[in-house]
């Protein structure tokens, strides 16, 4: 089986086992029997041992990444892709973290929704952020409906309207209205809610 080892950066090597597995490994983790730059044939047993090393490294990277904050499957997959791991190693690492409950897209979706709620983001903005993570709608829709009420959305847009108008109080009223509507619409709020918030200023 053909093995190719190349330098990725000062501390990391890229390993490719043709048709078998691939990924990156710290130089210190490479067995001493291999040079840091190599291209040649290895036995099946040697290939298996190297793939196990890569699988272990992918798992360690992912667990360290998830220890810092909640992440989506997409974010985790992209991390390991940047480290040159092949799809088999990536999916195995993701599944292992799911089994251990370190990776949970439902929990991530709830965390994301609450985070944007606290910033008074609109429902439309939150949905866009969830879709960016390629999370299935059936996963986050029930959470969103439970946590995001139309009453709260109305209160949020009113609060933002007050703050915006207070900061632009020197503008003529019509100009202020145009700018406030554009600002809140860009934030994803519905025109009806924006109009109601404007009317409440009077």
Image (cartoon, rainbow, N blue to C red):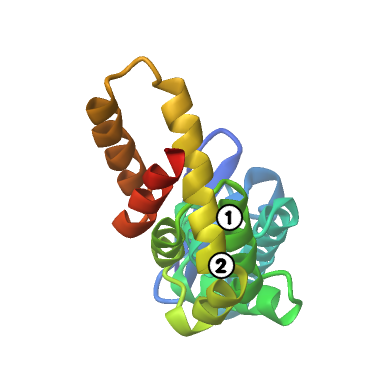
Q: Which residue is mark 1?
A: 117
Q: Is residue 39 visible?
A: no
Indicate whether 68 appears above or below 56: above
Residue 124 found in image quarter: bottom left
Q: Nearer the viewer, residue 119 or 82?
A: 119
What residue is shown at x 75% (from left), y 56% (from top)?
Answer: 67
Residue 48, picture quadrant? bottom right
Question: Residue 142 appears at what percent x and percent y?
Answer: 55, 81
The quadrant in which the N terminus is found is bottom left
Question: Element under label 2?
Answer: loop
Question: Can you name the residue that lies furthest to the front here?
Answer: 202
Image quadrant for the C terminus? Answer: top left
22 up-or-down from 169: above or below: below
Which of disc 2 and disc 1 is earlier in sequence? Answer: 1
Q: Residue at x 67, y 78 (%)?
A: 98
Label 1: which secondary element: helix
Q: From the viewer's side, name the closer residue of 11 and 179.
A: 179
With 115 as the anchor, is 200 left or right in this view? left
Mark 1 touches mark 2? (CB < 8 Å): yes
Q: Is residue 10 above or below residue 195?
A: above
Q: Residue furthest top?
A: 170
Rendered residue at 50%/78% (across/down):
141
Front residue of 195/112: it is 195
Q: Which residue is mark 2?
A: 148
């Amino acid at each position: 089986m053909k093995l190719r080892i190349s330098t990725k950066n000062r501390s990391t090597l890229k390993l490719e086992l043709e048709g078998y597995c691939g990924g990156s490994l710290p130089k210190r983790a490479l067995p001493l029997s291999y040079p840091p730059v190599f291209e040649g044939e290895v036995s099946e047993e040697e290939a298996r041992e190297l793939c196990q090393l890569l699988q272990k490294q992918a798992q360690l990277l992912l667990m360290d990444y998830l220890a810092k904050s909640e992440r989506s499957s997409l974010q985790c997959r992209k991390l390991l892709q940047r480290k040159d791991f092949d799809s088999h190693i990536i999916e195995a690492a993701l599944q292992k973290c799911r089994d251990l409950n370190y990776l949970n897209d439902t929990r991530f979706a709830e965390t994301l929704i609450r985070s944007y709620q606290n910033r008074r983001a609109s429902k439309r903005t939150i949905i866009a952020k969830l879709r960016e993570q390629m999370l299935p709608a059936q996963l986050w829709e029930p959470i969103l409906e439970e946590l995001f009420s139309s009453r709260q959305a109305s209160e949020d847009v009113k609060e933002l309207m007050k703050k915006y108008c207070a900061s632009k109080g020197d503008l003529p009223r019509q100009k202020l209205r145009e700018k406030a509507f554009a600002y809140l619409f860009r934030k994803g709020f519905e025109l009806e809610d924006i109009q109601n918030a404007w009317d409440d200023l009077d």
